[in-house]
Amino acid sequence: MTQTPAKTSISKGKATNIAVKFAVSYVRVSTLKQTKEDKTGIRRQEKDYQRWLKVHPEYKNLEGLEIRDLGVSGRKNVKEGALGRFLKKAEKGEIPANTCLVVESMSRLTRDEPYVGIGLIRRLWDLNHTIAFTQGSWRGEILTGREQGIFARIESSLEAASFEWEDKRARVVEYYSERAEAIEEGDKSFNRSRKDTKARMYPFWLDFDEKIGDFVEIPEKVKIVQRIFNMSETMGAKKIAYILQKEGLKNPTNGTSKFLAAATIRECILKSRAVLGEKVTRGVVKHDYFPPIITPEQFNFVHSAKDKRSTSENLVSKNKMVNLFQGVVHCAECGGRIDVVNKNRFVCINRREKGGVKELRRMEQMYCHHGRAKTNDCSVGNPIPYIYKHSGIDNELTILRQIQIFRWAEFFTDEKHEEALKIEIEKRNNFLKERNTVKDQIEKFNRAELKLFEEGEILPKHLRQKREEQQVKYDELDEKYNRAVLDIQNLKRKKTGEQAEKDIQLRVKEFMNKGRFDLDARSEFNMWLKEMGISVEVTIGKNLRKYPNNYGFEIGKGMFDPNTKKYIGLDQRLEDSHALGLDIKQVMKL
Ligand SMILES: [Zn+2]
């Protein structure tokens, strides 16, 4: 067998007695992630091969044949990879005899245990080929299987390669199950601070304080997240991204892009349940793992608002001109949202003249959302004018003026307000944390019960009792939490007195003079109204012909249900209701 002429079908050469031998390189990396490590791994294996060719000038690279297993494990490359296909070719005689397979190391060739690995190498030798390893003590030596002690050397090398693999896999599995258990137990000690590297396995608005062994908020980043949630009550992620970029806000997520992308806002912030304090590991939710920075109420509201935006329900968001009072104006009868609807109509210039000259009139009208949809919630289905340019009606301006002259000072009392609010917020957060801890314990019992159930058993009585105790505790804490939410709501309604009134007047005046016809200024003004808690209530009379006296606007601080965030009503029915200069009750009697 040894002196058979090579059939060089691949290199097109004629069959000659061997003057030149061929070599082929085998490259393998186990993941396809295109990480730096992988790329340098591939490059190093290629370089090693080139160097090997230089040291062995009697060998030429076998052109047209590449054996590469990228993303194939060293236990599958014979069965499923390029290495296996190469062996098959060799068995069919399609590879010139005495071809040397050049591999960086034993672990690149195979991670199989010695018995299987030796079989693989022997297959090559039996086909009259050779093998060389470029690294380690092998030093590129061309192995034919006849070297002294070769089997022992290969065996120990295979042992090391396969052990390394088993060990690595075991370590990875162990690492993850240990970590999952730790998280479930509330053990956070394996977390590290951000100081040496920015990438961490926890949200970007948090850091880990290794001294106290717990997460701490990064205030400026928490503020950004909270602001984004506030914004998303009325606008989509795209718009938020646009506004933040315009403000020059740098991407706070340690990501690669300079500004926050809409997708990041959507996926990494708005959808992240970590804002509620939750951490999910292997399908198990730990509720009090992180400090919560968004209330569950707001989180749910934002998600329902997002769903609404994605259906075509929302008329106003399709308008190019932002509805200035989106989410601020409510129907006095049902508390529902007021929509602004555009209508274009050709109308006779002279009303009495039949078939006379017509002109296009653009009318912006306000409707009660429920009333217009003729649901049972509200009986007012007719519109009132919002802006009629042709007849000089501009109720946007009317409302703005009312906000401007409103006696806000009565709604804002300063003393110690900030301090009280801080205490209440801390109280609320503590209740929430405690409640979540208890919830985790209850769920632990539930999981244990499920597991036992699958095994045909039931949860022992003492554990069931414990669970009941926890449930009682949970209900108590839940009530305390809800009460704290209400207290905060009430406190927030009273803010800072005279100064607040002046600030509001100034802000409205500035907007009326400069920003009213600028899209972004309108968006910002809308957000400001909501942050201030300013609400407008519209009373829509039923008689259309009584324009403009059958409708009116009332201004005040809006009250919202803390759980559903639904509008309840104005904080106080105001003594001076500005029904275009008339008393609202008088108007309704007309
Ligand atoms: Zn209504």
Image (cartoon, rainbow, N blue to C red):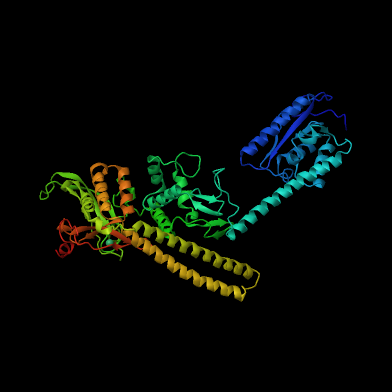
Q: Along the horizontal axis of the image, is 544 left or right of 204?
A: left
As displayed, is residue 94 above or below residue 536? above
Q: Residue furthest bottom?
A: 461
Q: Along the horizontal axis of the image, is 418 left or right of 256?
A: left
Q: Residue at x 60, y 52 (%)?
A: 190
Instruction: State the residue in front, 399 or 357.
Output: 399
Total numbered circles: 0
Instruction: State the residue in front, 328 or 494.
Output: 494
Instruction: State the residue in front, 524 or 146.
Output: 524
**Placement of the C terminus among the 4 image quadrants:** bottom left
Q: Residue 423 placed where, x, y %?
A: 40, 60
Residue 326 in view of the camera: no
Q: Residue furthest left?
A: 352
As displayed, is residue 416 above or below residue 228? below
Instruction: State the residue in front, 327 or 484.
Output: 484
- The image quarter containing residue 198 is top right
Of the four image quadrants, the one with ligand 1 is: bottom left
Q: Residue furthest front?
A: 416
Q: Residue 444 placed where, x, y %?
A: 58, 66
As displayed, is residue 509 above or below residue 371? above
Q: Residue at x 19, y 59 (%)?
A: 577
Residue 550 in view of the camera: yes
**Placement of the N terminus among the 4 image quadrants:** top right
Q: Residue 280 placed where, x, y %?
A: 55, 56
Q: Residue 229 placed where, x, y %?
A: 41, 52
